[in-house]
Amino acid sequence: MKLLLLLLSTIVTSFAAPTIFYSKLFPGSKPEYVGVLVMRDGAVEYREAKDEEPLCFHLDKADVDFIFAQADKVGNFSRPLESGLPVARMGEKSYRYEDGPIKSEVKFNYSQDPDANVLQDFMERIVESEQTLINLERTARFDRLGVNQVLLQLQVLVERKRLVCPQQFLKMLDRVAKNDVYLNIARDRAAQLAADFRALAVPQPTAAEGK
């Protein structure tokens, strides 16, 4: 029986979908730790402490394909990425790739690898987006007058094309837009952002369909 369970466990593991885990540890920063787990089906988990419940959301296929393609360009983290240059400490970055029995991991402070830097930028976009969502949730609860400032920060992310998965903001935006405890300017901005994000989720007609 034990042999059968072990065999079944091995089979399940061998067919497990690939995952990419990214973390950054930077003592003195706020937060000092961030962790992002990306699964091949698009599910993502974000944490600011290793033992906390994650924020969960779902990336679209294009973004997931991009992340895994970039990881492939750096050998799925099977080779060093550290530049070795005498630069200031910029936080210890870690990547881990898992695909069934295949596992690889790399850590670095600063890399000059262009493909690694492109992937790093996308991971930082995820971090910026989740930190803004956390900040919006906290401010809406404890600092109603500060909500508009956070919404302005969210708008800046949009304008700079730094926002990842805008649909995850819809619940909070609707809450602000429909609640008169918040400033009118914040309610109006939240309503406009929500409308813009919903428009992004609507498939656009092709040239043939538009005729």
Image (tube, rainbow, N blue to C red):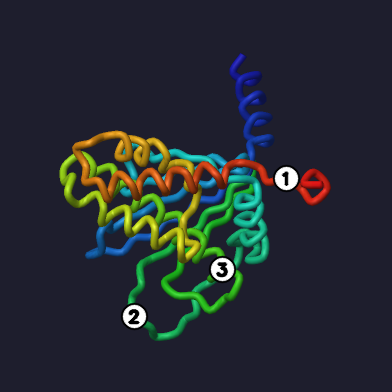
What residue is shown with label 3? Answer: 118
Dot in front, 2 or 3: 3
* Residue 211 location (% of width, % of height): 81, 47
* Residue 85 location (% of width, % of height): 44, 85
The crowding category of the residue bearing disc 3, from other C-alpha atoms within 10 Å (few below 14, some 14 to 19, many at least 20), is some
What residue is shown with label 1? Answer: 205
Which residue is nearer to you in this view: 63 or 180? 180
Sequence-first tag of 1 and 2 = 2
Residue type, numbered disc 1: Pro
Residue type, numbered disc 3: Val
Sequence-first tag of 2 and 3 = 2
- Give the residue drawn at x 21%, y 46%: 183
* Residue 182 location (% of width, % of height): 21, 42
- Give the residue drawn at x 38%, y 83%: 87
- Give the residue drawn at x 48%, y 42%: 167
Q: CA–CA distance between discs 2 and 3?
A: 20 Å
Q: CA–CA distance between discs 3 and 1?
A: 31 Å
* Residue 17 location (% of width, % of height): 64, 39
Mark 3, secondary structure of its residue: helix
Dot in front, 1 or 2: 1
Q: CA–CA distance between discs 1 and 2?
A: 49 Å
Quarter occupied by residue 194: top left
Dot in front, 3 or 1: 1
Which residue is nearer to you in this view: 36 or 156? 156
- Give the residue drawn at x 47%, y 47%: 166
The crowding category of the residue bearing disc 2, from other C-alpha atoms within 10 Å (few below 14, some 14 to 19, many at least 20), is few
What residue is shown with label 2? Answer: 88
Residue 5's label in the rendered image is none
The crowding category of the residue bearing disc 1, from other C-alpha atoms within 10 Å (few below 14, some 14 to 19, many at least 20), is few
